[in-house]
Amino acid sequence: MKTIKLAIAGLGRIGKIHLKNLCRNFPEVDVVGVMDVLDESKNIADEFNVNYFVKTIHELIALPDLDGIVICSPTDTHADYVEKAAKAGKHIFCEKPLDLSLDRVQEITAIVEQAGVGLMLGFNRRFDPEFKKVRELVVNGSIGEPQIVKITSRDPGPPPVEYVKVSGGIFLDMTIHDFDMARYISGKQVKEVYAKGAVMVDPEIGKAGDIDTASIILTFEDDTMAIIDNCRRAVYGYDQRLEVFGSKGMAQAENNFPDNHKLYTESGVSGALPLHFFLERYAASYNQEMKEFIDALVSGGKMPVDGNDGLMSIAIGLAAKKSVKENRPVRISEII
Amino acid sequence: MKTIKLAIAGLGRIGKIHLKNLCRNFPEVDVVGVMDVLDESKNIADEFNVNYFVKTIHELIALPDLDGIVICSPTDTHADYVEKAAKAGKHIFCEKPLDLSLDRVQEITAIVEQAGVGLMLGFNRRFDPEFKKVRELVVNGSIGEPQIVKITSRDPGPPPVEYVKVSGGIFLDMTIHDFDMARYISGKQVKEVYAKGAVMVDPEIGKAGDIDTASIILTFEDDTMAIIDNCRRAVYGYDQRLEVFGSKGMAQAENNFPDNHKLYTESGVSGALPLHFFLERYAASYNQEMKEFIDALVSGGKMPVDGNDGLMSIAIGLAAKKSVKENRPVRISEII
Amino acid sequence: MKTIKLAIAGLGRIGKIHLKNLCRNFPEVDVVGVMDVLDESKNIADEFNVNYFVKTIHELIALPDLDGIVICSPTDTHADYVEKAAKAGKHIFCEKPLDLSLDRVQEITAIVEQAGVGLMLGFNRRFDPEFKKVRELVVNGSIGEPQIVKITSRDPGPPPVEYVKVSGGIFLDMTIHDFDMARYISGKQVKEVYAKGAVMVDPEIGKAGDIDTASIILTFEDDTMAIIDNCRRAVYGYDQRLEVFGSKGMAQAENNFPDNHKLYTESGVSGALPLHFFLERYAASYNQEMKEFIDALVSGGKMPVDGNDGLMSIAIGLAAKKSVKENRPVRISEII
Amino acid sequence: MKTIKLAIAGLGRIGKIHLKNLCRNFPEVDVVGVMDVLDESKNIADEFNVNYFVKTIHELIALPDLDGIVICSPTDTHADYVEKAAKAGKHIFCEKPLDLSLDRVQEITAIVEQAGVGLMLGFNRRFDPEFKKVRELVVNGSIGEPQIVKITSRDPGPPPVEYVKVSGGIFLDMTIHDFDMARYISGKQVKEVYAKGAVMVDPEIGKAGDIDTASIILTFEDDTMAIIDNCRRAVYGYDQRLEVFGSKGMAQAENNFPDNHKLYTESGVSGALPLHFFLERYAASYNQEMKEFIDALVSGGKMPVDGNDGLMSIAIGLAAKKSVKENRPVRISEII
């Protein structure tokens, strides 16, 4: 079996997940090198018998016979690393978003296209078994023509305010997943966004110029709609649900729970809270997206989430931001 | 026990429900008369041993010792009947809406107030056990401060187009219940509406100048939000769900089902569809609203849904209509 | 419409239910008389405009033009009243059990047969929408050939020990419903019983010679089985579930709940407890059994639960009692 | 970190699972050798970089510095391999059952004890997250004193008849897991068994002297009970449920499903079937049992499932077999 040689840029939370999945679950993959700015990360590389531990993207890309690179470094490095990797002819998996600037995103997707390499964006939720199942029911016609998509997406708690300040705001940092999900699940393009926001969780988030609670209506090109609601803090945990209503039925994906137990006592019937943290909730999706990245890389086929998907989700995010600011629906054509 | 003497105007679908409930379940109530334009309706009156069957509102209101009147006649008669009953000093239960004209609604709520009679609007869903339970959880603080209210409200099928034409449109005919629910469940006033509509179910509805599918964001005075989605046809039946997300938790009301059975076979796990028709789904609510009307009437207390509630739901409906037409958020202060 | 004239013997808890249902929901029925030993019960009769309130079964049966009698008096009067009513040519609805003595039950079922009147036993659970739905799935072949029937039947709390002493024991008082359900749901005859009992709830029940917790295996004539578990006290309420496993699938009936709400908070997801009391849980069944009694009475057709059903449930109960005592499986042919 | 050196005897379905889990998920473990009678199995060993692939238990046990052995070979080899490993001073993980002969089981548990090595039996279901959660609720007192344990355990399809013939029968092959679960979940010893069996799935199983459908009542030493029902074929998949009813409440573990989706269409509400196959359903448990085996091995603590647990489950199985044959309750003291 021809071995695929990959390298990972960035060994933070998500980088470690990809490293672990690639080393344990993909016998055909050889993770030849990892890059991280922290010296301590070398221990992790060693634990998984990774040959090269480097400190710069140049060294990483220059590793011999490298097929592709998995970019898990901070957002502000994404565009630069993608550009460098593309120019070096490496296939690329990159965590979302590509960049917070739409111009820069357009620029690098053009570079990637010119370089003829594959670029896959890490919209991992597309690969979650729950949501894949709903997508399957849409594709196979079980619910007819989708008319209303509903996405509930609430985090267990807000990130640090320092992070919020550089995050690009809730729409580019958190809702961007939901924008992508709306496009993926419906198979439709968004033409207009109306978003309404509020600061309910932490006044500091408001002072940082962001919101922490939002309701959004997306209008697709055929006038069907998606409704998204977000909050940075759901005290009961990570709330990730999806519903597609169509001309022939409705499909729903419920939250995931650590177990299905029910306890009946004098005071009521109770059960487990949803899986609390995104790494647990979406564990299967991280593995599955790597699988589909590698499959596309091996077959030379189309990447399942491409640069245009990254571009569109950012455009919708920017439109949502503008919509909140100006309190009016904003057309995507105003943005891109 | 002092008997309460009531009369019913209109023996259509909903009038019959009230007649039956009042006669069977309220020993303290005597339905002394009913009014209907159709001769055949006399049979129904006879079946329940109602003494007087009359053809005009004048005769009905003039029945001796009448305490109150239950108005279930067509929408375009509501305001007139309420006015006449109020001026005659009768307490009033009136199906929604009071009128499609905001001016007229304001006029008659003023008349009612001046007359010193009780007026209760038939927003029956407030009296549904599912939604009452959620309201209870909001009131007792179980979910903290409500931040996002979500209402799913889909009919099993559209009314005849002829009806649609005189209905005042989906927002005044169907969503008006959801507008009232948003106010009731949150205990808050709406300050702004953004609504987006489409014609997905029947082009004839579009030709009649209406829409059949809608997504709506309501903004309350404290910047928290409600999200409503509607469709005139859900092929799987009557879809009536509610969710309130707050600072300390979330409360949900699921649909009601005719039974809880589950069938496991080779081809999957299946269960019953939701109760299909509003008369079944909301059977308990119709009885409960009569109970609370009679309780208020006997105690002389405040009516649980009053003229102002009727007024506000219409104002929100008109704002929603304007919002769709002008594709912009509309403030309630622009309407009223 | 020909009016059916019925009389009710006994105005205890269940007698009142039947009186109320008959008066409110069956326009074709006239409850002409009620009998009760307590003077106060006359008020209830008056409330429902019942013409005759009598103190003896003789007077009740002698009421003019009586079609049938509904027997809701204490168990030890059942056989006597049934005998008297049958001999007077009246159709009979009788609460379970007919009698605690098998000989006496056989005797009166013979009398009833000879008299040519209809006798329906009050196994109300057969008429519960949940269980009827499961029966329908068995009858229409959805689950193939039934192989294992499982019945969970637990009361919210034990009756007074004084009652336990004269009840005939848990199997004739409580499990008798489950024995009938096993026969009804499977459509099969029981040939053998193994029962195991314990005193877990209240030692006084043990001192009274009874048990309060039991596990039972019934074997049907075709060697398929039913499993029943009982307890006199489930702290979380009234637990009434049913499952039929067959060659092509499985059907389940869940408990009934007052509402479907779910509450998510930091401490878990919770919902309502099952309906606590049999009058609430089985409200629909009491009305439906009256309907089917009246239908059979009017059509002259077969009663949906007949004397033989009463007989068999008692025989199974006696076998279970013997099984616990002798700690061995007991064949029905040893009993009857 | 001190490396633990393990070897695996038998690379069938379950051996492969353990190999994969040990190699991927336990960095502290080194699988130094595997033994299998089939040459092809060497490929699997190679895939996981196992140094030694041998054909006999002698060679396996003789591997240098071996800490323990994981026995996944056919049942009739278990006792022999355990004996050899124990005498060589190796810790042992052995799939159930130890042996079909009670005498032999007693003999080898004595040998193991004398050798002072750890022996853990592969009752993997104890390590399933659903059942562990229920056990936790029992242990922490949430349901009070357990009074009735209910176990539903149905396979998606029967094994080949050739296998059935040498399996020791349904009770030693399939129900043995449930016998262990009853003991584990209640923390109680079984004193008596009543079992009833039938041949419903395949007459060939009957001809082989076995049954394929069973209902069992276990009586614990304190007279509380467990109820088990089994079938070799549930057309809807693998049905694995558990319920514990106690003096303060009830805890349930539902089946596991591949996803939580619901599909609403005109014809009903449907969802996924339970996970079909034991390797999927119990995937987490296989990993967790290895973890607890290794933890005990490292700490020198008590094995979480020991030889006595293996012994008792076989004794109960033999009692059940005798009970079906003689159609009477059989006390464990008659067996052991």
Image (tube, coloured by chain):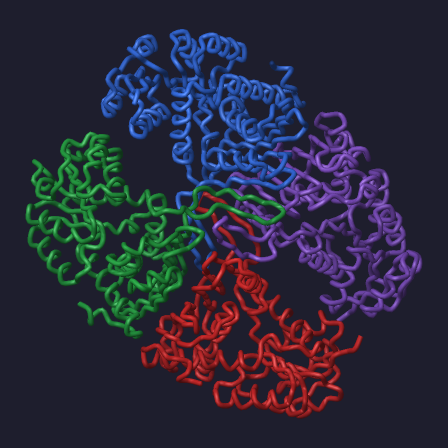
Chain colours: A purple, B blue, C green, D red
Identify which residue is drawn at 32% across, 81% down: D326
Q: Is residue B306 above or below residue A189?
A: above
Q: In this view, does D247 lie above or below B287?
A: below
x, y (%) of residue C291? 24, 41
Identify which residue is drawn at 25% across, 40% down: C16
- The front one of B144 and D165 is B144
Position of residue C71 in the picture relative to residue D263 (left or right): left
Position of residue A303 in the picture relative to residue A268 (left or right): right
x, y (%) of residue A165? 83, 39
Q: Picture quarter containing residue C104? A: bottom left
Identify which residue is drawn at 75% across, 68% down: A28
Q: Is residue A28 above or below residue B102?
A: below
Q: In which quarter of the image is the C terminus of chain B?
A: top right
Q: Picture quarter containing residue A293? A: bottom right
Q: In this view, does B267 lie above or below A49?
A: above
x, y (%) of residue D176? 48, 76
